[in-house]
Image (cartoon, rainbow, N blue to C red):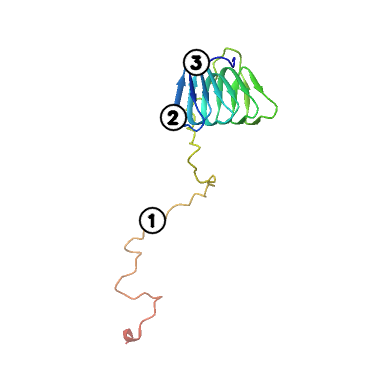
Amino acid sequence: MADHDPFNAILGKGCRFEGKLTFHGKVRIDGAFAGQIVSSDTLVIGAGADVTAEIDVGSLVLQGKLTGNVRATEAIELKQPAEMRGNLEAPALQIDRGVAFEGMSKMTRPGAQPARPAVAPTPVASPYARAPYAPTPVSAPVPGPVPAPATDAERPDEGAPSAAAPLAPDDRT
């Protein structure tokens, strides 16, 4: 991952993009990105970048903020002042002093394809839309059997006064 290689594309500071990014060569993100990134080559996330994505690349160099999971076939480098929230999977991992990393890491064999989840990954929410906090619901007890509706024989005669209801003064004889 030589730093002097030219970039095929750059998402500059002040730019925002949501969606799926696929590329060949070396790409740098210095702006905001939300979605999915897929490549067999190198992705560089600059110090000013804010990325929320599921990432599958050959190599990743992270200096900015990243929320999401990363799978790399070659290497992952987290350089100061990077902030990483998510899981990392690669045959080589380098984390500089001063980097904030919250997640798990898994070391794979060099040249091995990263393991793919059995189910499709959960889409990453856009960092620009805030959803309200919703606590996990607690299971309510299952109610017992529902009583059957009353039959005609069990219903009081609608025209006759009920034994429990007192008679009005004019109804008395």
Question: Marks 1 and 2, Cα distance to the nearest angstrom?
Answer: 54 Å
Q: Secondary structure at mark 1?
A: loop
Amino acid carrying mark 3 in the image: Gly
Q: Quadrant of residue 61?
A: top right
Depth check: 89 or 10 in front?
Answer: 10
**Image position, residue 75 (x, y; %):** 60, 18
Q: Which mark is residue 19?
A: 2
Bin the neighbour count of mark 1 within 10 Å (Cα to Cα): few under 14, some 14-19, many 20 and up.
few
Depth check: 33 or 67 in front?
Answer: 33
Amino acid carrying mark 2 in the image: Gly
Q: Name the residue carrying label 3.
A: 25
Q: Residue 119: in sight, yes or no?
A: no
Query: Which one is closest to the eye, mark 3 or mark 2?
Result: 3
Query: Which one is closest to the eye, mark 1 or mark 3?
Result: 3
* Identity of the residue furthest to the left in this view: 159
Which residue shows up at 35% across the image and 83% down it? 168
Q: Which mark is residue 148?
A: 1
**Image position, residue 158 (x, y; %):** 30, 70
Of the numbered discs 1 and 3, the one sitting upstream in the chain is 3
* Identity of the residue furthest to the right in this view: 97
Amino acid carrying mark 1 in the image: Ala
Q: Is residue 84 left or right of residue 117?
A: right
Whether 2 is drawn above or below 152: the answer is: above
Which residue shows up at 32% across the image and 86% down it? 170
Which residue shows up at 45% across the image and 52% down it? 145
Depth check: 127 or 28 in front?
Answer: 28
Q: Are marks 3 and 2 in contact (CB under 8 Å)?
A: no
Of the numbered discs 1 and 2, the one sitting upstream in the chain is 2
**Image position, residue 11 (x, y; %):** 49, 26
Image quadrant containing the N terminus: top right
